Structures are given as C-alpha cells and as structure tokens.
Image (spheres, rainbow, N blue to C red):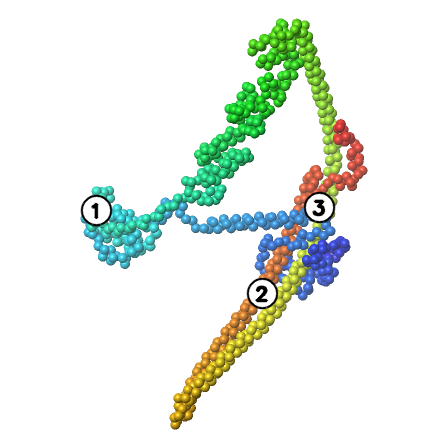
Amino acid sequence: MSVTMTLVEMEEDFTDLTIPADYIKFYGDPLSLVAGLDSTPTQWKGKGKAVGPSVDDEQPTVTVEEEVDWTRYNPPAALHTTPNFHDDVLVHIIKTSIDRIQARNAAEHRKREEEEEQRKKSSEPTTPDSEEDAAAKEPYLPIIILSDDPQPVSISEVQAHLDEADKEDLENLFSHDTPVSRMPFDFDTKPKKGRKFKLARLLKRLADRDSETPPVGDSSKNEEPSSSSEVTIKYEEPPLPPTPPEEVECVSCLDDFPQSALVKITCHSYCTPCFHRLITTACQNEQQWPPKCCLNTIPEETTLAHIPADLQKTFRRRAEEWALPAPDRIYCSRPTCSRFIPTRRVNHATRTARCSHRSHPPTCTLCRGPAHPTAEACPSDRDAALTEALAADAGWMHCGACHALVEHREACQHMTCRCGHEFCYVCALPWQTCGCTMDSLAEKLAAAAARVEARLLREAEEEEAVRMVEEFEREERLKQELLRAEAERAEAEQRAEREAIRQSEVKDRFEKLRRQMGDLRELQDVLVGWQHDREVEVLKGDGAAEEEALKERQLRERLEYDQTARDKVQAREISFKRDYASRVAEERDVEAKYMLELQAFYEGRVEGAEMVGDAMTLLRRQMDKGWRAWSQWRDGEMAAYQARVDEERTIQEEGLCSVKARLEDRLAEQAREATRRTAAEMKWAEEVWREREAMMVELEREELDDEETGSWYSFRDAEEELPGEADASGSGSESPSAAIPA
C-alpha cells in the first residue's frame, strides 16, 4: 500500500486527530508532512535494513549492507504514542508489548553471554590436578650405585664433559650433600632430549670405572663410602625467615589480630573488646538476647570462658530471668527495688516470693503486689473468689484460727477445726462465747438450702434458654441454606445468560480493537518514517553547522597564528637591530679611545701620524672581521628561528587538518549510526506489531475462556446497556441479600 493511500484513509478516519504537544515540540508536526506529500506512491524497504520514505524527494534511500543487531537499540518513540486512543486494552497492549520484547531480548543476551563464558572455560588448557599427574610427566633417570673401590673422579674430568652436559644440570645433579651411590636424580623441569642422553652417558662413565658393582640391597658397603669414591658438592640453603603469626580479621572492628587473641565462634571471630561489647549489649536489651552471630546462638560455655567475672554474673542473671516467659516473671513489689526474683525463691504453697533483700516485704505471685495477710485472699485470685461465692451460697464458715472453710453435715453448731480451734457454726465466734441455739442453726441451714435451690433453678433456666437459642439458630441456618440454594440456582441461570452476552460483546469489542489497532499502526508507521527523516535533516544540519563553525574557527586560528608568527619574527629582527646598534656604538667608543691612546703614544715622533693611521686601519679590519662573523651568526639565527616558526606553523596546520578529519570521521560515523538505528527501529516496529497482534489474540482467548468478570470487561457495562434484561432477571426470584434477616 502506498503512503499516500494510507494518509488519505487516515484523513477520512481521523479528521479530529490531535498530536500531543510534547511530541510536536520535539519532532515537529507530522500532519504538515501529510498535506505536502506527493501523490506518487513510494515503496518501503523491508527486513530492517532500510528507512522509510523521505520528506525530500532528492534524498536517496539509505541502506545498511551489514546485519544490524536491532536488540541493542531502543524502540522508536513513536511506538509509545497513542493519540486519541483511550481504550484500556489497547493502551495496555501498546505499553506491555514493548516491555515484553525488551525482557525477551535481555534474556537472550544473558543466555548468549553465559554460553560464551562456558565456551571460554571449555577452551582453556587443563593443568595436572594431582601430584601424581605432575610426577608422571617428569623424566625418568636410573639410580647409579658405585663399586667398592671406584677410582676417584677428578674435577678436570668433570670439566672435560661440561661441553657435553650443561653445567646447570650437573649442579642440579649434585645439589645434595650425599654420595652418588645414594642420590636419586630429580629435576624440576623436563630437560631436552639430547641433554638427557648426554647426562646418561656421563653417569654411565662414572659408574663403569669398576666392572664389579655391589648389589642394590647391600647397604653395608654403602654406609661409609670413602672420600675418593663419592662426589659430594655441599649446598647449604639460606635459613628461611621466621614465619609471622597468622592474623585474622575481627568481624566487628575489621582490625587484624593474631588468631590466638581472637574469640572463635561458629561463623566468625571477634577480638576481646568487641566480644565483651557484644555480650554487654545483649545483656542490656532483651530483643538481642541470646547473644548471636549471623543468627547462630553463641554457646554459653564459650561466652563464660571469654568474659570477666562481673559480666559473667550479669550474664547468668539475665539468662535465668529471660529464660522465663514475660507473664511468668516475678519482680520485687517495692518500686525502689523491682529486682527479678528467681524461681528458687518462690513459695508456691503460700503464693509469695521474696527477693534477695530480706528487709523487703514478700511479693504476691498472683497480683505482683505486696503479699496479703494470711486471712485475706488475693483479689486477683479468681479461683478463691469463686470458692467464696460457693461458700456464701452453701452457708460454709471460715475457721477463726486458720481461716479454713468448714461445712456442717450433722449434729449441733459446735464445730472443731482440724487445727483444733472450736467455734460456733452460726456466728463463727469461739465456742461458748455466744448465745446461739439449735433453732438458729436450723434457720441458717434452711437459708443456705434455699439459696442453693434458687441457684440450681437459675442455672436450669439458663440452660433452657441456651438450648432454645441453639434450636432457633439451627432452624435459621437451615432456612438460610434453602434460601442460598435457591439464590445459587437463580444466579447460575443469570450467569449463563450473562456469559452468552459477555462472549458476544467480547468478540465485538476485540473486532473493534483490531480496527483501531490497524489505524494506530498506520499512524505510528508514518510517525516513525517522519521521525527518521527529521533525524536525518537534523543530523545534516548539525553536521553542516559544525563544519562551518570549524572552518571559521580554523580560519581565525590561521590568521591569528600568521600574525603571531610575523610578530615573533619582527620582534627577533628588532632585537638583532638593537644588538647591532649597541655593537656599533661600542665599536665607535673603542675606536675613539684607541685613537686617543695611539696619539698620546706616538706624539712627538716623525712618522707618528702614519703609524697611528696604520694601527687604526688594523683595528678597523679586526672589527670588520668580527662584524662579518656576527652578521653570519645573526643570519643563521634568523634562519633557524624562521624555520622553527615555520615548523610550528606546519604542526598547527597538521593539527587543524587532524581536527577536521576527526570531525569528518565523527560525522560519517554519526551518519552510519543513524542508518543502523533507522534499520533497527524499523525492525523494532515490525517486531512490536507482531507482538501486539499475538497479545490481542491471547487476551481475546483469555476473555472468552474466563467465565467470570475478565480483566478488561465489567458486567456493570452490560447492566447499564441492558436495563430491561437485568430487571427481568432480578424479578424472577428473591434477592439473597433481601432474604437474609437483619
């Protein structure tokens, strides 16, 4: 399809199209491009290797010969624009499609990097993994054992073979202070093939001095070899410096300490001050108890072994206190003390506890206040309160001595407690101190029986009320179950009807979304192409401006440097002129002084004037000779200075040319990068629209498969569009919420 045809359709479908102001501010108005396009169709290049049609007809289409990795570039900004499109599904697809492609590209990049790392690791050469593998690669040399009486080997004979065997190999051969008959041969590196055979021949000559050789196992002849039968070269290794003690870093202060000075825990090591600080902090705050390192509890034995005595005492107290749950802890009731009372100082029989200060009163274990008198019960003791209520109803009495409860079973009102105290059951006074009779006892027992009967009747009434409430609730639950079943049946019918309506509307809606998606694609394709042309124009304009600015700047620099060079040469010439003037003045002074001296010297002589003239002529010749030498030196200096100035001018010109060349290279690289980015963005647009089409199909399938309210659809819209059907479906049965009683 040609661009002009697409734009005509866009003008028909989007007559009220508005472009965002921020987009126009940065890229310009693409609709002005639509009005100025020629009606001639322009073909677009594909496969991510070309740009779209240009605004300027004379601008040739730029192609990229090499393959462009489009995943390394960002997507074009036009793919994010959604002018006059407000549908939630469309906006979601447009925003999510680019994110999904970027996430997929990032995963592919990571996978390629991991494969490259694996390939590099597999291509690395392998090294011997064990000492056996390394030893297997060393050359094998036989052990040579000399005879009982071998001829001594002189140093001259050894020196005669130095041209065949390397001196370094001989030093390695006799590097231990042992006779040859006991010395195995061990080389650090693998010798060359020719060198190995030379050493073997040399050792064979040393061993074949005597035709008779002792057996290998005969150690009696090898224990004390004579000095003439062994070649011993002593080599003493320098003593190794003492190994410094290994230091380990403290995990808290990060300082290094000897390993013996640290406290080693399961996971880390602490210096002594840091360990004390750790334990002290744990003893001060229950949130940090017990002391831990990396969530590992420090053993109590380790802690007590590395802390001072006072901290040990505090640690044991905290361990005993915080080992109990907070509700079970008992503290001294005196506010000025409030010290924790250990369990060993708690009397469970009397329900009291006493702290270490014996002068402080005991503490009640129930209310945590001061202990109560023996005859009084703790107000916080719920069991005692219930017992007292039961005793009051049953008419039980307390013993006046031990305060124990006593129940009357039979006989008179004379009661004898287990503690031996005798009292009256009617008034609780000591026996024979009151005037109570058997009638008083009968009245008391009758009143108690009446209270017990009333209590039992009250409990029976309460049980009957509870039973009736439970029966009513059971009937209500059954009624609600029936109503709920009826409501579910009606809801199932309504749901089936709504599902049919929903699927039909989902299909219609996605068909509409596809048309909008096609229109948006045409618009974004035009925006992407217009953006590419705009970037090319901006790039060309910026490049031309930079080249023009560089040209003007370099012209100014050339003029300035030419003027500077002329000023330098002129200043040097002026300095030489000043030097020449000073030399001329000095020569004139010398001539005048010399003339006066000559006239004074030849005064009164016959030929004095002639001799003065000859002397002055000789002086002038010498001065002329010096002037010519100075003039020659001046000309050489000026020529050298001019050469330096010209050289500096040449260097500056080369620098200007280099700057110009770098600018041209940078502009060319920018043009190539713009071409690559254009191809990558075209590929981006192709991949994004393919992803958006796939997402549209996926969302439509999810909407059709979802029987309940979908992610992009609400039944509220259907109820608003179909009020008659909603009313009809709601009038067939009673609403569940209305059927449930308040």
Residue in the picture at 71% in, 58% down: 29
N-terminal-most mark, 2 or 1: 1
Q: Disc 2, disc 1: CB below 8 Å?
A: no
Q: Callout 1: 10 Å neighbours few (<14), some, many (20+)? A: some
- Name the mark nearer the viewer: 3 or 2: 2
Residue in the picture at 63% in, 52% down: 687
Residue with the mark numbered 1: 225
Residue nearer the viewer, 153 or 352 = 352
Do we see residue 215 in this rendering?
no
Residue 98, percent from left and from top: 64, 50
Residue with the mark numbered 3: 88
Label 2 secondary element: helix
Residue nearer the viewer, 527 or 440 = 440
Residue with the mark numbered 2: 663
Q: Disc 3, disc 2: CB below 8 Å?
A: no
Separation of residues labelled 1 and 3 (CA atoms): 103 Å
